[in-house]
Amino acid sequence: MIFVCYPKCSTCMKAKKHLNQLGLAFEERDISRENPTAEELERWIALSGLPVKKFFNTSGRLYQSLQLKEKLPTMSEREMITLLASDGMLVKRPLLIKENQVLVGYWAEAYAALV
């Protein structure tokens, strides 16, 4: 299981603590140092069943400074994935990747269901 997070993010800290409490083994990946590739994002988006837009960190400074709320509606899926792959701070976190399942964001109930 891969836990993609930003160590300074309070939500990521809560999610990591929960994973540890559940006794789940995971590989931690700092999204600010090791950005997901376009290929990884394509796979994770497909596995999640969510639209690409759900993978954007809409509350992030970079998202807001790039005015992506206005730009995303006119972008293709390929353009959005390329943009996400360009900077990890654009990607919603945490991401939890387990075999054929991807959880975007932190939902305590969904994490507990992994046990």
Image: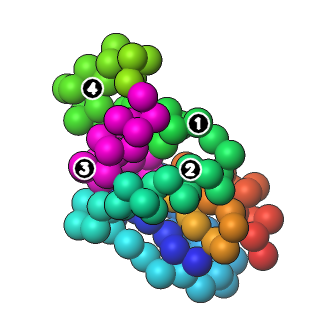
Q: Residue at x 58, y 77 (%)?
A: 1
Task: Kindly report the distance in space between the C-alpha atoms of the residues bearing marks 1 and 2.
Answer: 7 Å
Closer to viewer: mark 4 or mark 1: 1
- Total marks drawn? 4
| CA distance separating discs 3 and 1 | 19 Å
Q: Circle 1 sits in a helix, a strand or a loop, which is it?
A: loop
Front position in the image: 82 or 62: 82
Residue 46 visible at all? yes
Q: Which residue is the site of mark 1?
A: 51
Q: Main secondary structure of the magenta part?
A: helix
> Which percent across, then down, holds residue 55?
48, 42
Residue highlighted by disc 4: 64
Q: Give the Cα separation between the discs numbered 2 and 4.
A: 22 Å
Measuring 55% from the left and 57% from the top, which residue is drawn there?
A: 44
Three-letter code, disc 3: Asp
Is 81 displayed left or right of 111 in the figure?
left
Would you name the residue on which mark 2 appears? 45
Amino acid carrying label 4: it is Gln
Q: Give the residue drawn at x 45%, y 62%.
A: 40
Q: Secondary structure at mark 4?
A: helix
Disc ID at residue 14: none
The magenta-colored residue range is 76-93
Residue displayed at 46% across by 55% down: 41
